[in-house]
Amino acid sequence: MTNEYLENLLNTIKSKKNSDPNLSYTALLHKKGLNEILKKIGEEASETIIAAKSDDNNEIIHEIADLWFHCLVLLSQKNLSVNDVIVELKRREGTSGIEEKSNRKEK
């Protein structure tokens, strides 16, 4: 998977933002708003954790795909891009996780 694929998927999600919520799950999430999107991310994160404790890699992949999808819906809701996240990941590259967390606390 490439950044381009995720950006294209995000663009598809954004294009459905104002579609009929009776015909599009993505439109329904957008219509219900931020709290519903966050609830779905929480559910999918929990399901990912449960799947990770199993021996079924296909289930892990399925749940991470669901989690990523709902995170992309959040990016759409907030008018952000995949590139915004990639820029942040690149900014952190080469910095230890411990150092990065410490820097966050100082801000």
Image (spheres, rainbow, N blue to C red):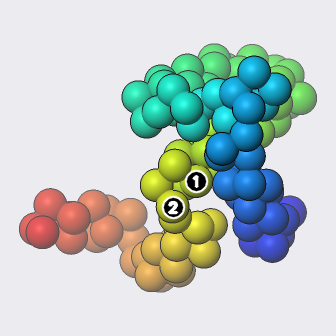
Which quadrant would residue 46 be assigned to in this image?
Answer: top right
The kind of secondary structure element at disc 2 is loop
Please name the residue that numbered disc 1 is placed on.
76
* Mark 1 neighbour class, 10 Å CA radius: few under 14, some 14 to 19, many 20 or more: many
Query: Is 63 displayed left or right of 50 in the figure?
Result: right
- Picture residue at 38% right of the left edge, 63% below the top: 97
Classify the position of the C terminus by image quarter: bottom left
**Residue beneath disc 2:** 79
Q: Which numbered circle lies on residue 100?
A: none
Tell me the SS state at disc 1.
Answer: helix
Image quadrant holding the N terminus, namely bottom right
Residue 97 vertical placement versus 68 (above, below): below
Mark 2, Cα crowd under 10 Å, few <14 / some 14-19 / many 20+, is few
**Residue 90 place in picture, x, y as percent:** 53, 80
CA gap between label 1 and label 2 equals: 5 Å
The answer to whether any part of residue 45 appears in the image is: no
As drawn, 49 above or below 9: above
Q: Quadrant of residue 4?
A: bottom right
Spot occupied by residue 27 in the image (x, y as percentages of width and height): 67, 35
Q: How many marks?
A: 2
Left/right placement of residue 99 relative to residue 106 reads right
Contact flag, marks 1 and 2 (Cβ < 8 Å): yes
Q: In the rendered view, would you say 82 is above or below 63? A: below
Q: What residue lies at 51% left-to-right and 26% top-to-bottom?
A: 32
The picture places residue 105, in percent across and down from the top left corner, at 15, 61
Looking at the image, can residue 31 be seen? yes
Residue 102, position in %: x, y? Answer: 20, 64
Residue type at mark 2 is Asn
Of the residues shown, which amino acid type is indicated by label 1?
Ser
Residue at 52 percent of width and 49 percent of height = 77
Task: Give the residue at the far left of this rendering.
Answer: 106
